[in-house]
Image: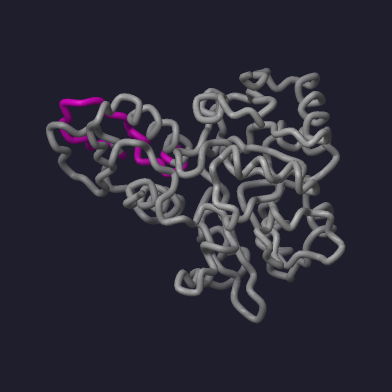
Amino acid sequence: MPPEFLPANEEAIAHAGALLREGRLVAFPTETVYGLGADATNDRAVAPIFETKGRPTFNPLIVHVSGREEAARHARFTPEADALARAFWPGGITLVLPRLATTPISLLVSAGLDTVALRAPGHPIAQALIRAADRPIAAPSANASGEVSPTRAQHVMASLGTREALALILDGGSCPLGLESTVIGFPENGAPTLLRPGAIAREEIEKVLGRKLAAADAASGEAGRSSPGQLASHYAPRAPLRLDVENPREDELLLAFGPHVPNCSRPVMNLSPSGDLREAAANLFAMLRSLDQLAEGHAIAVMPVPARGLGEAINDRLRRAAAPRD
């Protein structure tokens, strides 16, 4: 039986909150991407997230809370984490912090680690749903693991609409940022660490901190274990991607960027004709999905995107989408 598909009005949000309290899964919009939500305090509610997504259980989930005050009931804040929460919450930054022994958040959410990833979303529907559920909501992106992240409710239906555990999709329109949250870790006796680039640019975070972010130590497994979205092949369309292309081949579709687009005989979509990285971030996943549907066995060429600001996160997603996969 397919999930309910409802416009995110007051009645539907109240219904969604009741479903979450019953241990059901609800897909909902945030300012970054759509999330696949479950009651974060209920092991039996969280477990179907992994099954529904086909997600490895060693990959932690982000927990959505109303704000700094609620987050402090679940994790220990360092002064620098507190500064980032006050600067960017509600908004597109996730903080990986030491769990408090008293938190009711499921250990399954943290993949058995002694940390928990917390975010206060800025989308009014997400905030209303947290209030309606009256508990923190564990929510990775609402798509099958490894696929392109969903930025519209229809993307969720296309990816997960046949999954039995998904009870409801709240349709709140397109996600305004369209790129997952930036994830920052706070290792003991270490500098704040960029675990995943995302919707808040590195430079904005470093300005608040007054120092450079450290890079995650991939060799130690820090990024892959403590932060969502760190598998080598991730956000992947079915069609192969070829990156940093100045001149597409005759049989390739083109994901363009900027005003100077080379000739292409196959479909072209431009992340931002004006070269605006915020516009490009918002369009990235939706355009990847659209080109993938048109590819019909052909590859997608991707023009170079500058690595400054949000370009760092865009290029990270593109590299993962292009990575070899099983």
**Residue 163, quarter of the rendered image:** top right
Residue ID at (32%, 32%): 270
Where is residue 314 drawn, in percent x and y?
42, 48
Membership of 180 in magenta stretch: no
Task: Where is residue 84? Give x, y as percent.
Answer: 67, 60
Q: Main secondary structure of the magenta part?
A: loop
The reply to whether residue 242 is in sight is: yes
Q: Quadrant of residue 22?
A: top right
Question: Left of 42 or right of it: where is 146?
Answer: left
Numbered disc total: 0
Q: Residue at x 66, y 52 (%)?
A: 88
The percent coordinates of residue 119 (x first, y second) are 69, 51
Q: Which residues are magenta?
A: 257-280
Closest to the observer, 35 or 167: 167
Which residue is pictured at 28% across the width and 28% down the height?
A: 295
Camera-nearest residue between 115 and 189: 115
Q: Is residue 292 above or below residue 278?
A: above
For residue 236, side relative to residue 17 (left or right): left
> Visible in this render: residue 311?
no
What residue appears at the point 41 percent right and 39 percent down from the top-left corner?
Answer: 280
287 and 292: which one is in front?
292
In the rendered structure, the answer to whether residue 36 lies left or right of residue 309 reads: right
